[in-house]
Amino acid sequence: MTGLTQPDLGRMRSQLFFEGSDVRRRLSRYWLLLPLSAVIAAAGVVSDSTATVIGAMIVAPLMTPILGVVLSVVLRDVANLWRCLLLLLTGAVAVVWLGWVVGLFVPYPVVAATSGQVASRISPRLIDLAAALATGAVGSIALARSDISDTLPGVAIAISLVPPLAVVGLTLESGADHEALGSFLLFVTNVIAILASGIVVMAFFHVAALSGTARESSGHFLGYLFIGLLLLAVIVPLWANTEHVDRSTVRLTGVQAVADRWAEGAGWSVLGVSAFNDRVLIDATGPPPAPNLAILRHDLDDAGLGHVDVRVYRITGAYVRVAQSAH
């Protein structure tokens, strides 16, 4: 029904498993591309360059051992399962270490406050899990069907594997352990999502039946159960992050609207509104006199934001003419 044949299964094994006569060549390719992609990703994060980070995603070979784990579980191939897991774990550690080393050469902390690439990877949400599940499914389908394998570069870009690990290393070197934990959660989420969606795709294509292991259901059940439990385990922190980010977004949006009206009434302008812990910080500037903070507090209360701790940094300034030189 799905059109897969024994040659297709052999092709999938040759693409994912590190075995056979060319195993040394495949391993050398993996360990050549992985550190290079890690350095590219770390450089992209430090320079806050999205294009550079995307380049690292395309080069990174981590998708291979992850999908190898999927196929190993389906085929009940214990040897290749452990081999792929070992490559995945050691590869992840290597990327984190290289990110940490790159951070040693940066004269300032590489954290969310200094890099948008870090800020975008330290608070994963449920929507990130949904995207990773869909992307993992596309990658597995492209693996099973050679006629759509051209989508794999797009999958590499869509799924974020090496950049979060590079962020873990950079933020650990900068002393931002909490941000490192958030970025590591994003990496784990993406890996588990690929495993889960990959298992579903392999079941749809009846890969187990094609390999002759479909009747041996106990081993499959344990593998699927373990991946299902991992999926549930990441949903809890992702749910908490989603609730926190949504509340912060709604709060910032409300404060921004009130602050804009308050500043405009006094001929001032709001430069930015940001969150710091449980506080909302407003940067406002304009000519003297400064607008009345009591009016702002009143307007916030009327907007249902009386519980929000708001701090305003007022920049009172005026242009001063610089005397021209006689020459």
Image: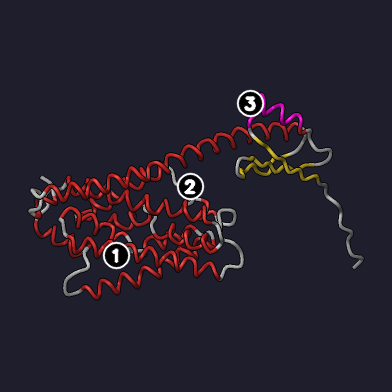
- What kind of residue is marked 1? Leu
Q: Does 132 sit above or below residue 55?
A: above
Q: Mark 3 or mark 2, which is nearer the start of the sequence?
A: 2
Counting residues from the start of the chain, the first of labels 2 and 1 encountered is: 1
Q: Tell me: residue 128, above or below residue 164.
A: above
Residue plotted at (63% across, 33% down): 308
Provide the secondary structure element on which disc 3 rests: loop
- The residue where tag 1 is placed is 86
In the foreground, 115 or 176: 176
318 or 92: which is nearer to us? 92
Picture quadrant of residue 278: top right
Q: Amino acid at mark 2?
A: Ser
Q: Nearer the viewer, residue 196 or 287?
A: 196
Which residue is identified by label 3?
Answer: 303
Magenta residues span 294-307
Q: Position of residue 35 (x, y in %)?
A: 40, 70
- Reading the image, the residue beneath label 2 is 123
Distance between mark 2 and mark 1 Cα atoms: 27 Å
Instruction: State the predominant SS element of the stretch in magenta.
Output: helix
Q: How many marks?
A: 3
Question: In the shown orientation, is residue 70 left or right of residue 236?
Answer: left
Q: Quadrant of the C terminus?
A: bottom right
Tell me the distance, in whole angstroms, between the alpha carbons under discs 2 and 3. Answer: 28 Å
Identity, as a three-letter code, of the amino acid under mark 3 = Ala
